[in-house]
Amino acid sequence: MNEQVTSTAPRKPRYRWRVVDIVVAALIAVTGGVIFWLWSLGAGPVGVLTAAYPPLAGLYSGGWVIPAVLGALIIRKPGAAFFCETVGAMGELLMGSKYGVAVMVSGMIQGLGAELIFAAFGYRKFTLTVALLAGGAAGLFMGLNDTIAPWGWNIAWALDHKIVYILCCVVGCAILAGVLSWLAARGLSRTGALSAFPSRNAASEPVL
């Protein structure tokens, strides 16, 4: 008679945040805050270049959502995208953002956009396709926030300008944040820097 052996050891929750997750997510967020601040400095010249058709400025927006996508690709746990984007926005605010407190709201909304994509895939798929979708969703939420919310920078624009701007945000964020973050995660994986994370083998995972 065969006796079925059943392990009584408690299973380790896959999605529970560890100290190392929090520390690295915070590092990504702080770095993101610096990127936000520098990216905001470039918004002025971009505004001059796109003065003939302002909605095109949305193509520049990808730098503002990199922490959300990169954080989720590395940490791979619920809340990583939202945490990294929100804390990054807080960092930009503390460094003296010209956008004031509204930058915090923007960070939370953009982080939520990326977070919803990773959640839709059950936090189990981190391919280039998912990274593109996450960046695009963050851009969509950014575009909606900027053009529809009462505090949006472009609330006074005509409807056609708003639509084009939102589409530009989606494209800009998908390419800049989605592709660059995916490449960065794979590059870090090759160095061994992600050995403590589920993303340790990101470099050898399927592209699509």
Image (cartoon, rainbow, N blue to C red):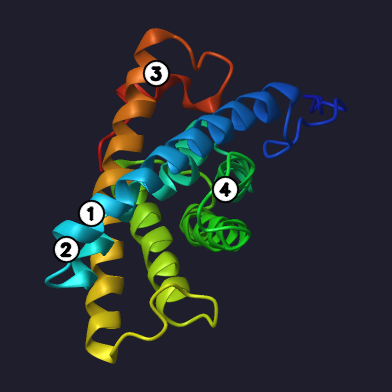
Point out the tag, 2 or 4, that comes first from the N-terminus: 2
- Give the SS element for disc 1: helix
Identify residue type, mark 3.
Answer: Leu
Residue 89: assigned label? 4
- For residue 66, above or below residue 188: below
Q: Quadrant of residue 136?
A: bottom left
Q: Which residue is mark 2?
A: 50
- Viewer-nearest of labels 2 and 3? 2
Image-based side of 92 in relation to 126, left or right: right
Identify residue type, mark 4.
Answer: Ala
Mark 2 and mark 4: span between their CA atoms? 25 Å
- Give the SS element for disc 2: loop
Q: Quadrant of the C terminus?
A: top left
Give the crowd class for mark 1: few <14, some 14-19, many >=20 residues within 10 Å. Answer: some
Residue most toward the bottom? 159
Point out the tag, 1 or 3, that comes first from the N-terminus: 1
- Give the SS element for disc 4: helix
